[in-house]
Image (spheres, helix red, strand yellow):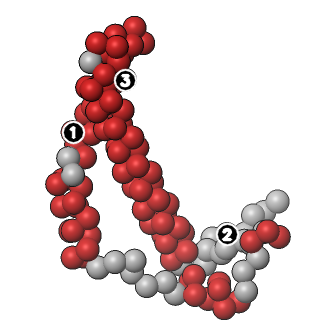
Amino acid sequence: MAYIQSTKDSELSDEELEALLHFKPSFDKARMEELECNSAAKGIGRLRRVTLLVLTIDAVQLSEVSVKDAKTYGRMVGFVNTFKEHAEALLALADSAKARLFVADAREIPADPA
């Protein structure tokens, strides 16, 4: 069975460890579908494309846009910030999913021969 190794700064009680080992679903499939729909409705694909587009433009061109079209430049900044927030939320979900997979791993893991 996989194990959780605690450190001095993050020692967990037996009850806390037991609760971690018997986690419940974070949300149901309906909520999962809702999250998917919300991402589509919020235009995350558009935000991602703007973020990628910014990465194709050099410093001189971006500076020119900031001076010549401050409104568009401001919108680009907002789009990138919103996409970053979304990506950070996705990273948190992925971290949670990864932790769940680690905790639930019931395979026998050989002891380190060292």
CB within 8 Å, label 1 to label 2: no
CB within 8 Å, label 3 to label 1: no
Name the residue carrying label 3: 55
Q: Earlier in the sequence, mark 3 or mark 1?
A: 1
* Residue 94 picture location, percent across and down: 44, 59
Q: Earlier in the sequence, mark 1 or mark 2?
A: 1
Residue found farthest to the bottom: 15
Name the residue carrying label 1: 46
> What residue is rendered at 27% in x and 26% in y?
71
For disc 1, the neighbor class at 10 Å (few under 14, some 14 to 19, many from 20) is few
Q: Quadrant of residue 102?
A: bottom right
* Residue 64 picture location, percent across and down: 34, 10
Q: In the figure, is residue 87 to the left or right of 75?
A: right
Count of numbered marks = 3
Q: Is residue 38 visible?
A: yes
Q: CA distance from mark 3 to mark 1?
A: 14 Å
Label 2's element?
loop
Residue 41 higher or lower than 10, as above or below = above
CB within 8 Å, label 2 to label 3: no
Compare residues 58 and 17 and report the one nearer the observer: 58
Q: Earlier in the sequence, mark 2 or mark 3?
A: 3
Label 1's element?
helix
The label shown at residue 110 is 2
For disc 3, the neighbor class at 10 Å (few under 14, some 14 to 19, many from 20) is few
Q: CA distance from mark 2 to mark 3?
A: 45 Å
Residue 108 higher or lower than 72, as above or below = below
* Residue 21 picture location, percent across and down: 56, 83
Mark nearer the viewer, 1 or 2 = 1
Compare residues 46 and 21 and report the one nearer the observer: 46
Three-letter amino acid code at the position of disc 1: Arg
